[in-house]
Image (cartoon, rainbow, N blue to C red):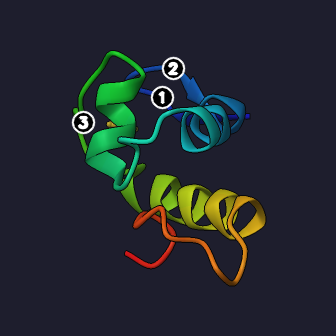
Amino acid sequence: MIVCSCNVLTDHDVRSAAKTQTSAKSARAVYGCLGCSAQCGRCARTIRKILKDALSQTCGESCSCGRCRA
Ligand code: FES
């Protein structure tokens, strides 16, 4: 499903960035990891939610990556 119509990013793109890019700590960083930047910003809340959900599934109790607790 497309979650960012300006940059044509899908929920899969965001989850993939969250799981493979250690610098994907915020919505802004996710845009950067995917080679784009925020345009209208309407998708930022959705991207933050997908990022948080993806990290909560990836990281465990003893995780020290610094992204999942941000
Ligand atoms: S919908 Fe993502 S920046 Fe506009």
How far separated are the C-alphas under marks 2 and 1? Answer: 5 Å
Q: Quadrant of ligand 1?
A: top left
Tag 3: amino acid: Ala
Q: Residue at x 74, y 34 (%)?
A: 1
What's the mark number on residue 38? Answer: 3
Say whether mark 1 is within 8 Å of ligand 1.
yes
User: Which residue is label 2 attached to?
Assistant: 8
Q: Is residue 22 left or right of residue 62?
A: left
* Nearer to the camera, 1 or 31: 31
Tag 2: amino acid: Val
How far separated are the C-alphas under marks 2 and 3? Answer: 11 Å
Say whether mark 3 is within 8 Å of ligand 1.
yes
Residue 66: horizontal and vertical position, in percent? 40, 67
- Check if mark 2's residue and mark 1's residue have beta carbons within 8 Å: yes
Q: Which quadrant holds residue 24?
A: top left
Q: Residue at x 48, y 34 (%)?
A: 21
Q: Residue at x 37, y 75 (%)?
A: 70
Q: Residue at x 61, y 57 (%)?
A: 50
Residue 31: horizontal and vertical position, in percent? 34, 33
| Sequence-first tag of 1 and 3 | 1
Badge 1 crowding class, 10 Å Cα cut-off, few under 14, some 14 to 19, many 20 or more, is few
Residue reaching furthest top?
A: 35
